[in-house]
Amino acid sequence: MTGIPAGDIARVGVVGCGQMGAGIAEVCARAGLDVKVAETTGEALEIGRTRLFNSLSKAAERGKISEAELAETQARLSFTTDLGEFADRDLVIEAVVENEQVKTEIFQVLDQVVTRPDAILASNTSSIPLVKLAVATSRPDQVIGIHFFNPAPVQQLVELIPALTTSEGTLGRAQLFAEKTLGKHSIRAQDRSGFVVNALLIPYLLSAIRMFESGIASREDIDNGMELGCAHPMGPLKLSDLIGLDTVASVAQSMYEEYKEPLYAAPPLLQRMVDAGRLGRKSGSGFYTYG
């Protein structure tokens, strides 16, 4: 997935270099874009850089990209702890923790430091209303949701979520970026908590957690039931671990606050696991234990 970027977006900024931010940065760099990645501290930045470069190296080992493409992709990536270095970006994608206050503060900063008048400010949020982020800026017409799925280099879907304030021009440029530049398949969702995929997925995951919590079935039987009985590639408890139990809980909370439907309420077990730091794969333990 390399070549000349389509459209007018050539310089991308990614705020956050965790699991999703690193994946988004990798996708953009492999598509031929100049990518600058920001983290809050030097330590977090180094962890993110290592995560990103390890993923690229694995792609080369598996023959997904050549050694020459590996070197070219790495050369397109730069790293910083200063959002002020995003001044020249055509597009900035925020991919930090699923917390409305944190995201709002980042958009306020980006609004001040990104100087290109036509720059798009995007969020990878999976549940937070885009309009709340848009109105925190002086350019709400240029704010949109561009929601990738984990792992971003593998998953082909991108959700595009325009806020009530998003212009048709911003939406069109974002769609061109997702489909032509990145080679993804895009679907459009209204600015409602959960959008399309999580509005369907989260109640399913929560139901599986409630089933395990109540002792109806073991974790293995729940996952095997969906994998072998419904041909799902991954059972719901394994998938929750992959997504991150803190993220599942945050999305559930956001959806419950919007709809007030009991099926969106996080089960007590899920919240206790988050409080205990058992977040899934990224922490080494969740419903399963990881090496």
Image (tube, rainbow, N blue to C red):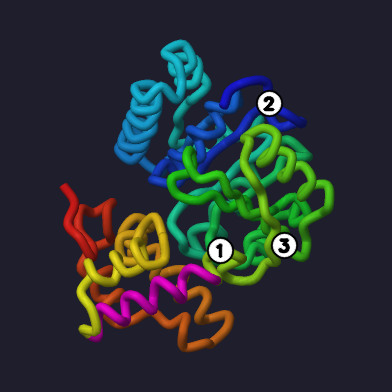
Q: Residue at x 33, y 29 (%)?
A: 54
Q: Residue at x 54, y 66 (%)?
A: 127
Relative placement, left or right, of 282 versus 100 is left
- Magenta part, dominant SS: helix
* Residue 191 in magenta stretch: no
Q: Residues within 10 Å of mark 2 (few under 14, many from 20)?
A: some
Residue sitting at the far right: 168
What amino acid type should be assigned to the residue bearing mark 3?
Ala
Give the percent coordinates (x, y) of residue 289: 17, 57
- Return the disc, 1 or 2, that comes first in the chain's sequence: 2
Residue 20 or residue 275, whichever sits in front: 20
Report which quarter residue 212 is drawn in: bottom left
* Magenta span of residues: 200-214
Q: Give the distance between the C-alpha atoms of the residues marked 3 and 2, in whole angstroms.
A: 26 Å
Please give the residue where the numbered disc 1 appears in the rendered image.
Answer: 197
Instruction: Report the disc number at residue 163.
Output: 3
Q: Are marks 3 and 1 in contact (CB under 8 Å)?
A: no
Q: Which residue was labeled with disc 2?
A: 5
Kindly identify the amino acid type of the residue bearing the numbered disc 1: Val
Q: Is residue 228 left or right of residue 288?
A: right
- Local SS, label 3: loop
Q: Residue at x 68, y 62 (%)?
A: 189
Q: Judge by depth and name the residue closer to the eye, 99 or 243.
A: 243
Which numbered disc, 3 or 2, marks the residue closer to the eye? 2
Disc 2 secondary structure class = loop
Q: Residue at x 30, y 37 (%)?
A: 43
- Residue 41 pos. (x, y %): 36, 40
